[in-house]
Image (spheres, helix red, strand yellow):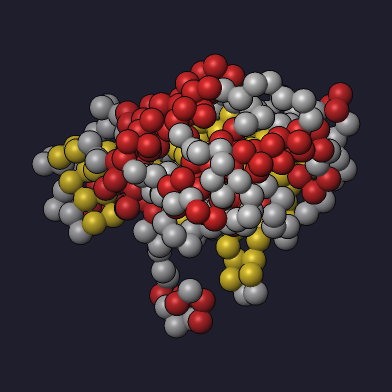
Amino acid sequence: MQDRNILHPAAASSLPVEVSHLTKSFGSFRTLDDISFSIAQGETVALLGRNGAGKSTLIGCLMGFLLADSGNIDIFGYNIAILPREIRARTGFVPQTMTGFGNFRVAQLMDYIAAFYGELSPIDPALTAWADLDPKKQVRSLSGGQKQRLAIVLAMRHSPEFLVLDEPVASLDPHARRDFINLLDTYTQRTGASILISSHILSDLERLCSRLIFVRQGNVVLDVSTETFRATTRWLEHPAPDQLLAALPADIQILGQRPDALLVHGWTGNLILPEGTLTVIPDFEDAFLEITTPRISPAETNTPDSAT
């Protein structure tokens, strides 16, 4: 993955995250296929895709847990393969499920993790109030939701400038989830941190994130601001979709197709469409399902990988 040398700090990029032409395969199955994107300071970006789309593999590569086959990942201008400790300390990660550390008490584990970062500012009281954990309890005795709250506290304890969250609210009850989204929103506004979040709670992502990256079968199929997505993504309903296709300009992206409709990105009210075409604003969940549905070509239907 080291296609070039690690950057000198003086040449470090102003972008917290840059991913360029990333590929990753497991055996003959390509999980990531030429993925490229960047994240600016202060951006909160949603990583959207169905199970198996490659999201967790991408996050694993971003965090240095997995080594990509080719391409580059730069965090604060440094190649992820040789990331200095002081740069790594500027990142935080919340996994889908917290494992290990069962013999630690909550307070012991928080002190243990904090020691890796040197001298830290006092912990944000809003964070500890939200987590509402008994410091004397052993980690092994915590419920699934309590462990997830602890994982979030550990990831945010050192006020990271880049925070990655992989299904962070899956184990939280609705109240804890709502309060965490509010907490995260306040944190980004206060610190200017950049966030990449993967979640299947689409309403949270639509509310929290300024940008949406849709992944399907290891490819980025759409990378767009939330505002632009809302303004320019439409269902175009017509009994003859072929007529619609012929009428659409080349810069209109087809995101999905049904027997009597096309889901398009790049719509404007100035489009000249066949008579009888209905324009419908898609529900976010409906659009997600259409955009992320795997596409299987006839050549793939009889291959071993098509069942993966």
Q: Residue at x 88, y 31 (%)?
A: 8
Snapshot quadrant of residue 259:
bottom left
Could one spot residue 225 in this view of the protein?
no
Seen as rendered, the residue at the extreme top is: 190
Q: Residue at x 28, y 54 (%)?
A: 257
Closer to the camera in the image, 134 or 305 = 134
Please indicate whether residue 276 sits to the left or right of residue 224 in the image: left
Image coordinates for residue 149, horizontal then vertical, percent: 49, 41
Please indicate whether residue 42 sits to the left or right of residue 21 in the image: left
Closer to the camera in the image, 208 or 107 = 107
**Image quadrant for the N terminus?**
bottom right
Image coordinates for residue 76, horizontal then vertical, percent: 73, 31
Q: Residue at x 64, y 49 (%)?
A: 104
Snapshot quadrant of residue 277:
top left
Could one spot residue 253 in this view of the protein?
yes
Relative height, residue 117 to residue 66 (above, below): above
Please indicate whether residue 58 sits to the left or right of residue 285 in the image: right
Image coordinates for residue 184, horizontal then vertical, percent: 48, 28
- Total of numbered circles in the picture? 0
Image coordinates for residue 142, horizontal then vertical, percent: 48, 50
Closer to the camera in the image, 273 or 308 = 308
Seen as rendered, the residue at the extreme front is: 136
Relative height, residue 69 to residue 128 (above, below): below
Q: Residue at x 65, y 43 (%)?
A: 109
Please indicate whether residue 191 sits to the left or right of residue 79 in the image: left
